[in-house]
Amino acid sequence: EQWFEAKFNDGDKYITIKLNGHVRTVVESIAFKNPEYILEFNKKYKMRRRPREYVDGDFDLYMDDGSYQSLVNPPVTFYTDSIQPPQVLNLPALTEAGIDSIDEYRSNGGEFILHDELTDPLCSTLNEVSEDDDTPVFGKLPDGSWLVYDPRLKLEENTPISHLEDGGGLIQSLTGGDSRCVNAPRTFVNEEQCTLSFSPTACGSSGTPDVEIELNANNIALLHSITGQYIYGVLGLPVVDHEDTTLESPCTVGLRSRWEIKDATECTHSILGTETNATLVDLLTKSSDTNPFVRDIIFPTRGYSCSVDDTLALDDVELVIGGICYKRVHPDHMSVYDFTYWTLDDTHPGNMVAAMEGEYNPIKKWMDLDNNVFLTYPSFPSGDVPNHSAGRWDTHSTKFPMLGRFGDTVLFVDLPNEIRLDEVAQHFGETSSIGGSGVVVCGSPFEAPNDPSEGYQFDMTTRRNIDLWGLGSQREHLWVMVGLTSVDQLRQRVAWALSQLLVVVPGAVSIADSHTEAFLTYYDIFVRNAFGNYGDVLREISYSPLMAENLSFLQSKSAAYMWETQGKISFADENFAREIMQLFSTGLYLLNLDGTQKLDDYGQPIPVYSNDEIMSFSRVWTGFDYQQARGNVEETSWSGNRHDPMRIQSAWRDKFPKTDLTGGYIGDGYPLCIDLPDKMFLRKGARYRLLGSSSSPELMEDHSYFKKDPNIKRFVLDSNSGLKARLCNASNGECQYEMSVTLDTNIDCVGKECIADTVRVVDVGGIYYEYARPPCVEQAFYNNAMKVIYRERWADSSCANPLLPYASEACCSVANLRAQRYPNYLYDQERVLFSTANSRCEEIGMTSCDFNDIGGIETHQKGYHWSTDHCRILLKVNSVGQVAIVYEPEDYAYLHPHIRDDNRNFFKVYWRGDYPKNDNDVTTGNNCGGGICEALVTGGCLCDTVISETLVFSRMPENKEEVLANLNIGAYDPSAFDEGTYTEQEANGVKAYFTSFGIFDRDTVFEVTDEFGRIQRFKNTKESVRIKGAPEYSFRNAPSFMSLLNTEASVRDAEYETEAALDHYLHHDNTAPFVAIRLIQRFTTSNPSPRYVKEVATAFRNGKYGQFGTGAYGDLAATIAAVLLEPEARSVTLDADPFRGGLREPILRVMAVLRSMEVEKSEGYPVLRLEGMSDKIGQMAHSFPTVFSFFLPEYRPDGRPGEATLVGPETMIMDMPKMVGMLNGLFSLVKYGLSSCDGGFGAGRGCTEGDFSSAAGQLTLFMPYTEVSDDDQAEAAVNKLSTLLTSGRLSDSNKEIIKKAYKETLPDVDAALRMAQQLLLTSPEFHSTNIVKMSGESRAEPELPQPSGSPYKAIVYVMFGGGCDSYNMLVPHTCTGIKDMYAEYQQVREEIALPKSSLLEIDASTSNQICDSFGLHPKLKAVQGMYNDGDLLFFTNTGVLTKETDKENWRRDTVTQLFAHNWMQREAERVDPLKEADGTGILGRIADALNKKGRSVGTFSIERNTISLIGTPGLTSTPFILSRSGVSKFNNRASSESMEADIAAINNATAPESGVFGDYWSETLVKSLSHNKLLYDTLSDKQTDITFPTSYLGRQLEMVAKMIDSRAERGSDADMFFLSTGGWDTHSNVLDNMDRLFEDVDNSFKAFADEMKAKGVWDGVTVIETSDFARTLAPNTGRGSDHAWGGNYMMFGGGVKGGKIVGTYPDNLTDDGPRSLGRGRMIPTTSWDAVFLPLAEWAGATTDDLADICPNMDNFPASHFTDATTLFEII
């Protein structure tokens, strides 16, 4: 905020102007421009926005009446008899060297930059840095005029190779911490260039602060004070609300119930059944919950039960146990939430009411007025506040981030982003900052300084939250400037191509409109790696916070973590796991190296993955989080660090095995951790990572108190240690510490090293290194597990592998269970093997024991300690054969939920045959393996396990392929073991390493080099997990990088697992041809031959193409070289092939014009700004509409390309509005320069051809009139333009047309050039890469259709793009059948369920559904009205089907690639799964049927191309694409009257041998211009009677309404319309998003229905709504839902017999249901065929047309379809 004041008192000669309390200038007079307002002196006014920073510019002040008024900005002036500024420097004259004018245009010549230092004595008294509240500094020039110092933001150079020596610590100190530390986090991007700084001002980050915060009253108030967030504990939530809604019984298996702890005197013990009482008392007293105010218990899956009479309802239960009362309360009672969202004006309904009545905000008042950290929910309030139901709380509480329970101690890392600020960590005792000598400092790529001499060009958002606008387009402008001026054009083109492959959608990123730099940082990944390695690109985008937000895996947490910390059943977000495969690496179907699809035995393409693999890989992408915020980058306190690669929070990471894409596991081929050499930390391959003076590890986790305890014991290397010498790396007696050290030889142990099993952090003379164990895996199941106890018996226990150093010793004397550590332990929380623990205890005369406590050390020095108890490792099998791991130690007090018997952490295993099945789970069970396993009441079987190991090879393998096919357990490098451990033998391309010479045993190691050049080592064994007592049930043991022991699940191993997953994607057989095709399409041709693809893919795999490339797999230099240099790319002969080439990308056409026609900026325009390009031409950098980029690579257009079965990606956005937009923009650029005139691409206003004075830039290519004939002049000009704009491909006939027009415009040579440029820019040679051969014939003008006189019918197809969560559109409400379906819905949907009280009830009693009534989403009031009026119906559980199918056969019965946006949308638009009418869509085939009957049918899409409207060529015309904004006039103010005829002639008919894409341009252009004129003339007078919403959907429907109104003028008696609306891909925050989306849908549909009624065509219009698919009923960890299958859709119109639900709503929503594929993915019961066939009959199709309209209909029985007369009034 800035405040203005004009000071003037009686007797003053001048008015003193003050800004923010400081003198700014003096004036003789000042007044508002509006004379009705009087400027009051000596009054402070708040400024509205930044002033126009030049003399006579405007600035606005807010007035008391709420308006704002303008004044004129005065010059800075002081007089000898006026007040003088307190700080004045003497400046040199403006004419002297060292001072220059900058920003002359913007400041009217009023800004200057001083290059040389001043010697004025005042300088020494000024602050080193400028602060906001500093007294202004003025400068006085020799001529007596004045300037004021204008402090500007200074950015430092902080690149990896030139980073700030102290990490910006000095700047941070000088600004009092207002500037953050600049030091970038050390990551794979910069690690090699980081340095160790010994500067005393060095600063850095140690990662996430290890802060624990108790949620007590004082701390909650402090959190509010620091962050401004409204944080409350909740009271008043009902157990039974005013609607008699009660909580579920606490005896419900798996239910979490909460009990408030009170004094026994406050309660009366409830009378319960004996069994119930005993169970609840036992659970409450044995609970490990340490919260002092409430206790949560979860009812176990086995071992406990309640009395039958008590299981139905236990509401107000009070149990008195000793002196304590436990009172049953609401499960959120005393939970602490951030309610800030609920304080906003437009969220909580009472806020606006309170504001209108002059009362305080009802949510803020608790904290602000009452100083109360509790908010009491008004379940039964007094006064005029209505009763609030429990359902209302359930609805809205999902919007409030939860911190924990009052009394809990929570980790800083688990706080919501808005609260997780450095200021919070600092206040509570620790920040992420480290400082002083010995700090690792790093930079980040392209973090360059700003150059003040360039003046003002770009804005940036800072923590000051300045009100800036237009930042969303800055990244576009920068891309244009780089594209125009950069000398590395090929690098920039490759980067642009990669950005279209690895897409970030700005609309999916919350800072899209307010930040620039984060998007440039992401784009720079492609610039830096354009000729690098695709693997590096894949890694960088996967760690990019922008990509993580874009594809919603940012802060995704494992299901186990969510259940343990928040009691929520949710799943990892699947979005990125799907798209990184489908779009970034493998694609959907298996490919040969030449890019052709591999086919199965039935000739069908083979999917790369199923949803099982997506769910598995989604668990890899848990744990990713922002790095800590830092300085020197564009960032606000709330936006998160979106610049640096993300870090992984190991606690959030899924710990369980993950299957891969090839029938194995992520982790196959890696050595087992138990097989690493003894003392691996001294062996070859051991890696050490420099920490500097901080001893806190970064890849592992120590207790937070380690940082505070000066007496912590670390592992100090002996002075004569070889390891110390290697880490010191001394030169001239001084250590030269390296960032990372990997031992290249084994090192002999010295002293303590010889008795250590492993190390964590080692002290090298006051500088520390962290040991990073090499990548290795643990098997999920193992024999001889031992129990470990964390700190003390009543804390928690777990199982651990005794062969791994995962716990410390615990030594007891006889009969004393208070254990102690070995007195000479090597470091605090040292990890040792179980055998070492026993030896140490024996050494001091004690024994290992099952202890109670550890004495003699502080709590934070304790960790897990070995006990002598054993552990059973069980497995739980669900109905589909997935397993979960269950630990069962002997005699334990507490187990973490992720290893308890009620855990839901199932993962896929590869059973060898059948598996135990619970008879209650499946149709045909086996009594849980014949009774060997325990049948669980919650479903599944619980089985004991035994592990067996089998020798694989007893001979030398015949080849490396045999090794790779049969072995999966990796082995470590034999050379790292002691000399003599292995002997070597080599044959058949295989090396064998024997521990016993020549004997093949389980310890034999085989080494091979795979097809990608990687050395792979395998152990000669297989491990199987067998069901104890039933060995016929077995599967291969599953490896995992992550330990199930919480303290050992480290960042290190999460990074290893991530790298293994990325490596798996990269080296998949599909990735090379997939990337090859995508890059070829961006550079040379849309339809490359298999040979071309194979050569490029081979270059990708070999990393070499001729002299280009490093030889490394994935080398992009080699790949791009092959793309551009392969004969198919360069052959002149092949250029003549009519099927080669393609359309040029729209934005590249514009850039080609700007570059070749030599655009230059106008004075005062430092940056060329192209405005509104996405709307005008359909493409702009940084403006991707979807993750699929601007167009689909497999998109097949109609016309000649479609007839030749060619794809044409760019044709997807080549529609009438964009073609007109392109040509209008180019014409404007030629005629007026960079201007907005007549649809121009700029912002200038001038509209006089040839006058560029008002333009931001102009084309400067000049061809002076020479002393030659007009013919020669024209020839030279057109030839030059042909060379520059078409690479010399302009046909002779088109040259003649353009030359003629050129000559007719002479002698005005400039006008002649403009005419030639404009005409050439319409040519097919410019817009395509084809050679065009004209046939000499004119292209036929489209004829206006003639109506048949039949009653008008219109089908309006609305696609909810992204996958609508339609089980929150149509929800079970009242069900009088065998069960409460709403309760089941609520149980499955968890936190994303809609409360029953909010639903809009509709009657379904006549629809033969499971429920008598259903509920609509609360925002769908108009939809409810149409349903009740009988004009709207629902199709339920509907989707793409090849045939009717079930849970056992759906894979076999379904040919469609399910769950992928583009394929599922395409199938909903085609309705032809077997491709019997390939290349056509459902509306197009309906139009075919109507056209055959003589109807005049129009086909129109709004905004985008769609296959749905494509019919049979020659029968149904090519559909037209309209803009939602209306129709723009083409070529307004044409340069000549003959232009229209010339453009038509240039785009005349082509010969058969002419390029098909050039022909497609011309054919589409001619039709587009004809229809554009017709529609422009027709629609200009059309007005709607109803006001439509201005939303994207509302504007589209308004355009449809106008088109329907124009049917007579268009000669149409039937129309097909297609429109789509996005935003439905709700992987996060589904409830908020659906509120917003459905509100728009409801308003838009109502306006359309009302307009149709007003225009009298309601009975002739039917709207059908579809979506890609529904979404999972079970939520993910981001409060969202993922891709599913069958969903619910609506259809409405005057002819619809509504008020019914068609199809079969699922009668079981759980995963046990017969239609559920897991997570609530429902197999459809109704096909798209059954939806569209009756609709076609309503439109006028007859029985003999139906097989053509839905070619797949015969795959369904007649009972599958609903008669059209049931759904429609058929006239």
Image (tube, rainbow, N blue to C red):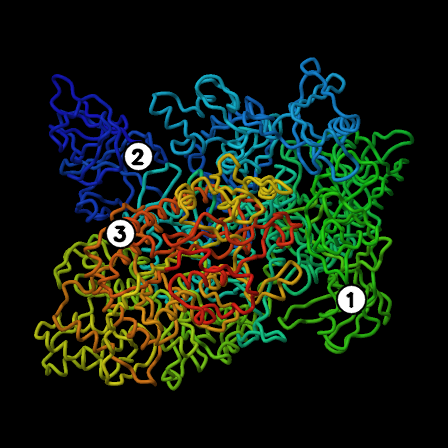
Sequence-wise, which precedes: disc 3 or disc 2? Answer: 2
Camera-nearest residue between 735 and 1581:
1581
Instruction: Work out whether residue 270 or residue 619 is closer to the camera in this orientation and state it.
Output: 270
| Residue 1738 visible | yes
Q: Secondary structure at mark 3?
A: loop
Which amino acid lies under the numbered mark 1 shown in the image of this protein?
A: Val
Q: Residue furthest left?
A: 1307
The residue that appears at 87% across and 67% down in the rendered structure is 996
Q: Note whether 71 is above or below 1058 in the view shown.
A: above
Mark linked to residue 1655: 3
Dot 2 crowding, Cα within 10 Å, few <14, some 14–19, many 20+: some
* Depth order, front residue of 5/721: 5
Tell me the number on the disc at residue 332.
none
Along the polypeptide, which appears first: circle 1 or circle 2?
Answer: 2
| Mark drawn on residue 1005 | 1
User: What residue is at 38 percent from the left and 86 percent from the top?
Assistant: 1133
Residue 233 in the figure: left or right of residue 1024: left
The residues tagged by marks 1 and 3 sit, at their Cα atoms, a distance apart of 81 Å
**What residue would you read off at disc 2?**
123
From the top left corner, tell me how far across and down residue 1768 is, in percent: 42, 56
Q: Is residue 727 above or below residue 1458?
A: above
Horizontal and vertical percent position of residue 901:
75, 43
Distance of mark 1 from mark 2, alpha carbons?
A: 73 Å
User: What amino acid does circle 3 point to?
Assistant: Lys
Q: Quadrant of the N terminus?
A: top left
Classify residue 1411 as left or right of residue 450: right
